[in-house]
Image (tube, helix red, strand yellow):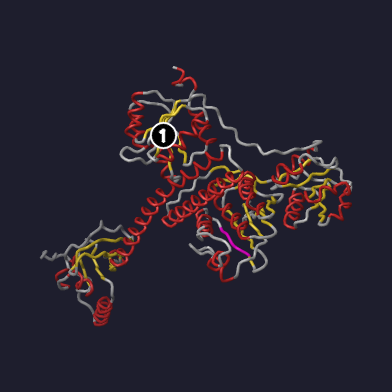
Amino acid sequence: MTKKPSDNSGRSPFSRPKSGVETGLTTFLMTAFDSMGELVLMRGSNGRVLHVNRPFLEAFGGDAGDWVGRWFSVAPPLKEDGSRRYEMLMRTRTGPLWIEWDERQMDGGIGVISVGRDITARREHHDNLEASQRAKNMFFAAVTHELRTPLAGTLGVARLLEATPLQPDQADYVRSLSASAEHALEMIDDILDLSRLEAGKLNLRPESVDVADLVREIIELAAPKAHEKGLEIGAVFTCDAPAQITGDAARLKQVLFNLIGNAVKFTETGGVRLDISNAPCPDGKPRLSIAVSDTGPGISENDQAALFEEFERGAAEREGKEDGAGLGLAMVRRLVEAMGSAMGLESELGQGSRFWITFELPVERCVSDQPLAGRELAVAVADPTMRSILVDQIEALGGHCFAIDNPNRLAAASGRELLIDWAWFDRVVEASAAHSWVLVTPAEKSRIAEGLPEAIDGWFVKPLRRSTLIAQITGRPDRIVKTQVQPELVELDKLRVLVAEDDPVNALIARKTLERLGAEVEVVESGTAALKALEQLSFDAALLDQRMPGMDGPELARMARANGWDIPLIALTANSTEADRQVCLDAGMDEFLTKPVDPVILGDTLKRLCNKEKRSSLG
């Protein structure tokens, strides 16, 4: 037992001579302290114990007198007039316990009062949750990687088949195979994103984003399915809509594609419309607002309440009218929240649905001009969704637009510039329009391309781009023929490429894709074999699978760089996470491509990275 100090600084303030009133008050306080569920410890300014309560003694043993005057401190001295809270694992009579101490200076600087709470259960619960989350993340990472590898192979082989001569029915089978693999990969990505969002591990990559390009890409991806169902689809930009923002382009696409994809999926007649507008902050700063509206069956109030929860499928899916995992909207909500933004839903049964998002993202530039100001136009379209899209877009661009919903009223377009439905184009002469353009889908264009009446100046291919509308209306060419430009594959001119890939299907895809581009390819099945090949032969570039048995892609890259080899090293991986990308780049790789590798992206990457003067094939 430590000897009790003889100076007054170590003596309890309750032990000095007291009046009767003081004695009663002291007794009351001591009784109150003993009745508390928390541990109470009072120390003098010199750090020695002045008083402890009964719960403290029950936890640590002894009598009150045994503790007074002793040192009892598990943390550095508290600063003057300070307070703090900390957690400490401590040995007690019942075993190790986590104690949370809340310490505060007493008035007059006479010492410190500490209140301790047993938080062992909370800590264990927290640790269990963390362990469970880690286990779940490891499970998702492992399973999704194993699923992505064969699915990427399936999609890659389907793309190779699409590039070969096929009978019409065979081409349809291959397209269905490709669409199924793409859908499965998208579902895996949704599962992974939900897991990362739950764990707070999703890293956003802000960059400058052109809103018109973003919307155009998403609309054109969704258009084939919409046109297949006989639906119209299009976008309207208001006159002051944000044109350039700072955000994560990939995640923005993910959000919009899910919303538009759902709208197309659950709509049987009519169409889907995107509205891009400015929703200014209270201080006047612009904000991007995007709404996706459809003419579908609507959503009941009961379904609306749970629609954004994981694995909630809604009435249409539950009744077997459509299928899905119910992950899309849950992921959209989490992504929107991760961007610090807000979203909502407006819907009534039988009245369609409208999902809206107000993005709290920096706006770099807004639309400011109205290039169709002063122009008189007419839109003659049967479908009310497409008619409203075109009329609203033309008027947002400054034009005055007259809507025609019946071919018998075409005379109202006299002297105007006319956009006419392809189903009515043979009656265009009745309009006596100044200029006329027919609106067609890609499939419809092929039917009428050779037989346009003289009154037709050209056509617009739906979904109509805002930029195309402006360019063609203001340019007034004699005849406009719009063709879809296919991306050109670069010629690699016998570039010598090493491929390290342990999966035979993905190795085949990489080899055939590179050979199509004109490269000479050598394939090895492991990192060790790749290292040996790099030591013995000359290559212009190497494609390295990120995960291989034994020596993986990053380890191989580190060894290659340590040996002074400066050839381009490109990661090939089934995983597309930012963490995986960073691991590969940190190891010394030059680029990061996901499977199945896109021929255009692969060709452009190799062309960019391979310096012609250093080509091994030139030696």
Magenta stretch, main secondary structure, is: strand
Where's the C terminus, which quadrant?
A: top left
Within-10-Å neighbours for mark 1: few <14, some 14–19, many 20+? many
Where's the N terminus, which quadrant?
A: bottom left
Magenta stretch holds residue 66: no
Viewer-nearest residue: 482 or 212: 482
Q: Which residues are magenta?
A: 342-346
Residue sitting at x 52%, y 53%: 339
Residue sitting at x 81%, y 40%: 457
Amino acid type, label 1: Met
* Image-based side of 363 in relation to 408, left or right: left
At which x and y percent is residue 506? 44, 40
At which x and y percent is residue 574? 43, 44
At which x and y percent is residue 535? 34, 25
Disc 1 marks which residue?
589
The residue lying furthest to the top in this view is: 619
Q: Circle 1 — which element?
A: loop
Residue 104 visible in rendering: no
Residue sitting at x 40%, y 32%: 523
* Image-based side of 145 in relation to 608, left or right: left
Residue 494 position (above or below residue 485): above
Viewer-nearest residue: 330 or 406: 406
Residue 307 position (above or below residue 538): below
Viewer-nearest residue: 310 or 238: 310
Residue sitting at x 16%, y 71%: 61
Number of labels in the image equals: 1
Would you identify the image quadrant in which residue 140 lies?
bottom left
Viewer-nearest residue: 366 or 218: 218
* Image-based side of 437 in relation to 151, left or right: right
* Image-based side of 355 in relation to 337, left or right: right
